Image: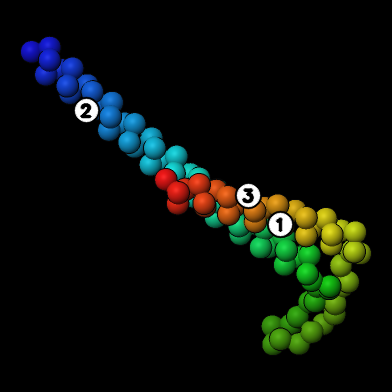
Amino acid sequence: MERGTDRERAAVRDRWEAMERQRTLTTDLLAGLSLVAAGAIVLGLAAARSVCETSLRGHVLGCTPLAGSESALLLVAVGVAALVAGLCRFWRVTRT
């Protein structure tokens, strides 16, 4: 009787370990996706020169220039770092 119970416990433990591995992979995949998206958004902000306000019909009401080249350089650095970190997470998930 005890051997059957031990086998059942081992099977349940193995199943929980498999579920935990799957959960970890899913978390890494979502974190990688979030980092890549954030990096793309930050790089888009770094490339922008001004922000324009438009009306509902698409007419430009006015534009506001963004900050200088120092902040653009900082945004590029942060964007590239986020992209690299996200792609590394993707690579680690797809490798397993």
Above or below 67: residue 35: above
In the rendered image, which quarter is residue 79 located in? bottom right
Between the residue at mark 2 and the residue at mark 1, the CA separation in whole angstroms equals: 44 Å
Q: Residues within 10 Å of mark 1 (few under 14, many from 20)?
A: some
First reached walking from the N terminus: tag 2 or tag 1: 2
The label shown at residue 9 is none
Please report whichever mark, 2 or 3, sits nearer to the chain's N-terminal start: 2
Mark yes or no: residue 26 visible.
no
**Which residue is labeled 1 in the image?**
80
- Earlier along the polypeptide chain: callout 1 or callout 3? 1
Q: Which type of secondary structure does the marked residue at label 1 adopt?
A: helix
Residue nearest the viewer, comparing 19 with 94: 94
Left or right position of 20 against 29: left
Front one among 59 and 68 = 68
Q: Give the residue pinned by disc 3.
A: 85
Residue assigned mark 2:
11
**Residue at point 85% right, 80% down?**
62
- Under circle 2, the secondary element is helix
- Residue 56 x, y percent position in the rendering: 69, 83
Please, which residue is most extreme toward the top here?
A: 2
Q: Position of residue 34 (x, y in %)?
A: 58, 53
Badge 2 vs badge 3, beta-carbon distance below 8 Å: no
Q: Residue at x 71, y 57 (%)?
A: 80
Residue type at the position of mark 1: Val
Which kind of residue does numbered mark 2 sit on? Ala
Label 3, secondary structure: give it.
Answer: helix
Measured as percent of width and height from the top left, residue 7 is found at: 17, 21
Which residue is pictured at 69% across the width and 87% down the height? Answer: 57
